Image (cartoon, helix red, strand yellow):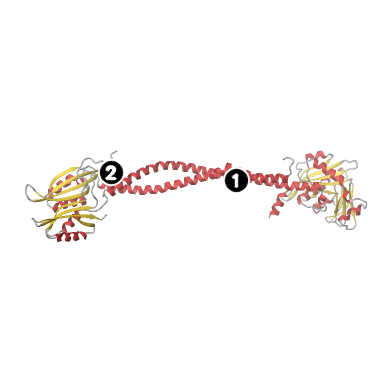
Amino acid sequence: MKGATSKQKLKWLGIAFLPLLFLCYKLALARTVSEYALYRANKEAISQLDTSTGEGISMEARRRQLDGLSALYFLDTSRYTSNLLEIVTEFCHDNNLKLKDYRPLGMPAVQPVRVLTRIVTVSGEFLPCLRLVYALEMQFRAGKVRSVAYQSFTDPATKEPALDCTIYIQNILADEK
Amino acid sequence: MWSSIRERLVQIDTATGIELVFSSDEQVTIHACTVRLENNTPVKKIRHSRLEKYADLQALGDRKAASAVFSGRGVLVKKLGQRIERDKALSAVLPQAKPEEFYTQVDDSGPCTIVALARKTLVDKALAELQGQGITVLDFSLGFTAVNNILPFISPDADGRIETSTYTLTVRENTLWDFESGAPGPAVDNHEYLVGRQYLQGCDLLPYAAAVALIAGNTGPGFSFGHQQIEANREEYKYRRYLQSALVFALVFLFTVLLANFLLYDHYFNLNKGLTVHQQASQKEMADRQKTGKTLAEKETFFRNAGWLTGVKTSFLADRLASFLPEGTGFTALSFFPPGKAGSANISFTKDTISISGWCNDPYQINLLMNNIKTLEEVQTVNLTGYSYRKDEQQGNFSLELIIKP
């Protein structure tokens, strides 16, 4: 090396420069490249999270919609407008109907929403019965009218034809914490 | 472009002029002057005069580019009256001399031709001595011919005389007119000449002129005489400059690349750190959201499948069905969305079925009733599921099943 001419040294420098560049790439540039790749991956993941934030917003809208629906049919006996027994009793009194049956169908265990089903049976003319159903469906918030059955029969006591109207009403119960 | 870059790379910016004055007793007196190019002006930096040994040249700072001037005993300078061809200069001065034994330098830039001669053995020995002191001699000249490089910038005495260490030159109109050989003595050291903007002593004139010629790249007449060692030195010097430039370029390139790389790495590292923290926080939030989404989907499915979202009103349908009854027919039972398992807590209801039971006097009335029911927009199909006729009562009993549109 000491006896070499500058021309030879220049040639060696040119030859040594390529491995030097490779070393630089391997020890330094490659790490930056991998760091940049990690950055791209993180950025991609963040953008997916952002997308899921959008999903979260739509999910919030769905949750609010469900909450609104639940609130509509929530079991609430504290007010007249939503107390089924009070509504039916009052209606029967005003419309010459006879309340024959009022009972819940046991304690429900339906998941993911707990639902209470109650049966109300009134006896009387068709039109008052129809009005009662209409009132329960449209005016009061006593619950969801799920099924209605009108059944005519001959009253064994009076031997007169009579009509029973059986209404199935369902309410949503609060989740058990 | 490449040639201009190459010129800049090999440009000599510091050069040393060395005048070797041979005396009769084989002694040599050395005058040296280092010149550096500053703002395109050659400036004298270091000077040494009347050195008596080659080893004293160690005191010179930069010894990588030097130009030697040989004068004194052993160097013959002759003035010829007529112009003469260069290859005939030696025979014109020394008719018996062998050309291979002499270095010859011809200067015909003035009104007369000046020929300088020196034996090759004398010059080569001196060059070897200089080389031995680590001095890279890139050029040499004989006699006072080097002074031509700075002659227009020298302010001579009032009588037009310039005294160097060996020669007394006569200058007229910036042209070398005449000369006299012979050392003017130490008095020349005290005599200063204005050269450009700086003062030089007489003994520094020739070293300075030789150094300036090297910096200016002035090859001059008989440049280096094709001397093998000088050519090798010049080649080595050129490649040394290339090597230095290449090294600087390589180091600057690598440093720049590594610095830029470091800045980029640091930039992305910090970004990644922030993103990782953000991601970790978001992952928990996402897990919660997924759980909530699953619950919501289950609830939505439940509400949809259980018919909670349908807006069909039984009171409306019951009213319409009753209105469709033709003469001589009647309903005995009307069941909207009948329950599946009556009496169970987990009761389920049909979502689209209406069951009707009734009586009629004429089976035709059933058709009429069914057609009437079909006019209802909400009804998809009407099926007669049962019919029996009781002859004793002359009355038929029927049962219908209506399917509501979803």
- Horizontally, is B384 left or right of A23 in the view? left
- To which chain does the residue with label 1 belong? B
Q: Amino acid at mark 2?
A: Val
Residue A134 in picture, x, y percent from top left: 19, 52
What residue is shown with label 1?
Answer: B257
Q: Amino acid at mark 1?
A: Val
Query: Does any portion of residue B36 appear in the rendered image?
Result: no
Residue displayed at 18% across by 57% down: B321
- Horizontally, is B85 left or right of B250 in the view? right
Q: What is the total number of numbered labels drawn onto the structure image?
A: 2
Categorize mark 1 by other alpha carbons within 10 Å: few (<14), some (14-19), many (20+): some
The residue nearer to you, when weighing B334 against A2, is: B334
Q: Which quadrant of the rendered structure holds the C terminus of chain B?
A: bottom left
Residue displayed at 86% across by 44% down: B21
The residue nearer to you, when weighing B31 against B66, is: B66
Quarter of the image where one finds residue A3: top right
Query: Does any portion of residue A166 appear in the rendered image?
Result: yes
Say if labels 1 and 2 share a chain: no
Residue displayed at 46% across by 47% down: A44
Residue extending farthest to the front is B391
- Which SS class for mark 1? helix
- Horizontally, is A1 left or right of A44 in the view? right
Residue extending farthest to the left is A158
- To which chain does the residue with label 2 belong? A
Indicate whether B330 appears above or below A119. Answer: below
Residue displayed at 60% across by 46% down: B257
What residue is shown with label 2?
Answer: A113
- Which SS class for mark 2? loop
Residue B373 in picture, x, y percent from top left: 20, 59
Quarter of the image where one finds residue B137: top right
Q: Which quadrant of the rendered structure holds the N terminus of chain B?
A: bottom right
